[in-house]
Image (tube, helix red, strand yellow):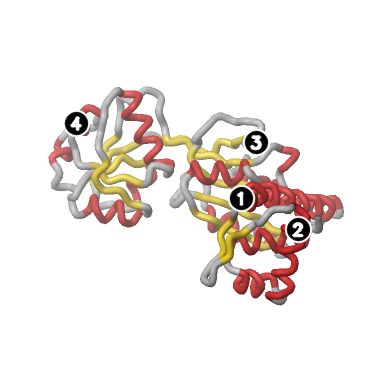
Amino acid sequence: MELRHLQHFVAVAEDQHFTRAAERLMVSQSGLSASIRALERELRAPLFVRTTRRVTLTEAGRALLAEAERILMQVRAAHEAVAAVQGVVRGTLSVGTEQCIAGVHVAGLLAAFRRRHPDVEIRLRQSGSGALAEEVAAGRLDLAFAYRTQADSDQLRSASLTGEPMYVLCHPDHRLTGAAAALTPADVADEVFVDFHPDWGPRRATDAAFAAAGVRRTVALEVNDVHSLLDLVDENLGVAVVPRHFRHKREALTALPLEGAGEVVYETVALLPPARATSPAARALMALLETERGG
């Protein structure tokens, strides 16, 4: 089994199209097809279901994909490790992040990293914290900035960035603005809630806070970006429970601290693979982050 066969297979799986994959790899479509056929012959199993419009993975193809990605990641890590010993950080840095994550200015950090390591190709993916944790554990991301979703494990470790209390955001004309200085989950249980997709860190923290207080709530308006959430609250269509730093994103809104939820806080972390599997580029980025944070 040749590495190029695995590289070709992963590209077709990602693009779900032979022509697009061939263009991205800068190989001929006939050569790419021959490479996939050679891999299928060696494995004695079809890897794709081919149609005129797209290709999809067979069960055997899905089983191979995870292992192929892992192998290619290990090969890349080996090349980068040798380069690092020679004093050069190069290769690819794949970073994941949630929107508006606390404790790190992602764009500024990546810009500073590029100035120091211009030979490293930076890739960025934005997603929910649960998905990001899975991507790092599977080796598809070098590291991610996310809400802590789980304890450290053999596949995933974390470095704490910051912890924040949760706040209730509401329109200035909302009845809650005349309430006490702080609110409990019971105080807002019957409100119309605006919130993020369940995989997002702020949503997970809010769900945990209400669960800790034994209070049920219903999310009527679910969004996937910060500005939409703020717009809906700004139109007095509902209230939102968010980390403290969100209150500065729309100064016209009223922000009241949420209490009575035990020790639940919004904790953001850098998610990393085990130390032995952390790429030189990821280590360099974390070292830069520690320097900028004064650590």
User: Which circle's residue, 4 or 3, is located before the other in the chain?
Assistant: 3
Residue 109 placement (x, y as % from top left): 58, 54
CB atoms at circles 4 and 1 under 8 Å apart? no
Name the residue that disc number 4 marks. Answer: 180
Identify the element where label 4 is drawn: loop
Name the residue that disc number 1 marks. Answer: 62
Q: Amino acid at mark 1?
A: Arg
Q: Nearer the viewer, residue 242 or 60?
A: 60
Count the marks.
Answer: 4
- Camera-nearest label, 4 or 1: 1
Is the residue marked by circle 1 packed among few (<14), some (14-19), or many (20+) residues within 10 Å? some
Is the residue marked by circle 2 packed among few (<14), some (14-19), or many (20+) residues within 10 Å? few
- Camera-nearest label, 3 or 1: 1
User: Which circle's residue, 4 or 2, is located before the other in the chain?
Assistant: 2
Task: In the rendered structure, find residue 155 and report the number of the disc placed on it.
Answer: 3
Residue 103 placement (x, y as % from top left): 50, 44
- Camera-nearest label, 3 or 2: 2
Q: Amino acid at mark 2?
A: Arg
User: Which circle's residue, 4 or 1, is located before the other in the chain?
Assistant: 1
Name the residue that disc number 2 marks. Answer: 41
Q: CA distance from mark 3 to mark 1?
A: 21 Å
Q: Amino acid at mark 3?
A: Gln
Is the residue marked by circle 3 packed among few (<14), some (14-19), or many (20+) residues within 10 Å? some
Is the residue marked by circle 4 packed among few (<14), some (14-19), or many (20+) residues within 10 Å? few
Q: CA distance from mark 4 to mark 2?
A: 71 Å
Residue 73 placement (x, y as % from top left): 72, 51
Q: Nearer the viewer, residue 113 or 189?
A: 189
Tell me, yes or no, if residue 94 can be seen here: yes
CB atoms at circles 2 and 1 under 8 Å apart? no
